Amino acid sequence: MLQSHGGIVRVFPVFPAGQKASFYRRRTFGAFLVSSAIRNGKIPYVRIESEKGRDCTLVNPWPGKKVDVYRDGKKGEMLQGDWLVMKTKTGETLVLGPQDAGCFGD
């Protein structure tokens, strides 16, 4: 469900089609707590809590799509590309979702 290696975070890198699952606050490399879900082969959101304020690199779980980033509940930047690189602050919570998906929940 979650893979963190070499400073790169991946959510649901290999997951059976048709299955649904979620995880909450799994610790990753770089002192991040990551939460996400998958339903019908789609990932509605990725939530990242930064414990140490380090840069976070996430493999884009929405290939080919732009990604909205919400920082502590406020709309922040829009990212795109295969790898999403984000600067974080200690204690900051980021919620990411495909562009224009609106509120993707927890």
Image (cartoon, helix red, strand yellow):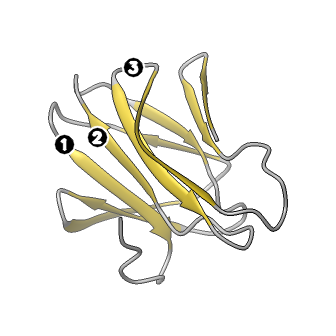
In depth, the one of 103 and 58 nearer the eye is: 103
Checking the image for residue 30, the label placed there is: 3
* CB within 8 Å, label 2 to label 1: yes
Q: Secondary structure at mark 2?
A: strand
Estimate the x, y position of residue 38 in percent, counting from the top left: 62, 62
**Quadrant of res 30:** top left
In the rendered view, would you say 32 is above or below 30? below
Earlier in the chain: of badge 1 and badge 3, it is: 3
Q: Give the alpha-carbon distance from disc 2 to disc 3, as whole Å.
A: 11 Å
Estimate the x, y position of residue 105 in percent, counting from the top left: 36, 72
In the rendered view, would you say 59 is above or below 94? above
Toward the top, the furthest residue is: 6
Question: For mark 2, what is the residue?
Answer: 49
Estimate the x, y position of residue 35 in percent, counting from the top left: 43, 48
Q: Residue at x 46, y 19 (%)?
A: 29
Q: Residue at x 35, y 64 (%)?
A: 106
Name which residue type carries label 3: Gly
* Neighbours of disc 2 within 10 Å: few (<14), some (14-19), many (20+): many
Q: Residue at x 81, y 68 (%)?
A: 18
Estimate the x, y position of residue 45 in percent, counting from the top left: 48, 63
Q: Residue at x 64, y 55 (%)?
A: 61
Question: For mark 1, what is the residue?
Answer: 92
Earlier in the chain: of badge 2 and badge 1, it is: 2
Name which residue type carries label 1: Glu
Judged left or right of residue 32, residue 101 is: right
Q: Give the alpha-carbon distance from disc 2 to disc 1, as whole Å.
A: 6 Å
Q: Secondary structure at mark 1?
A: loop
Name which residue type carries label 2: Glu
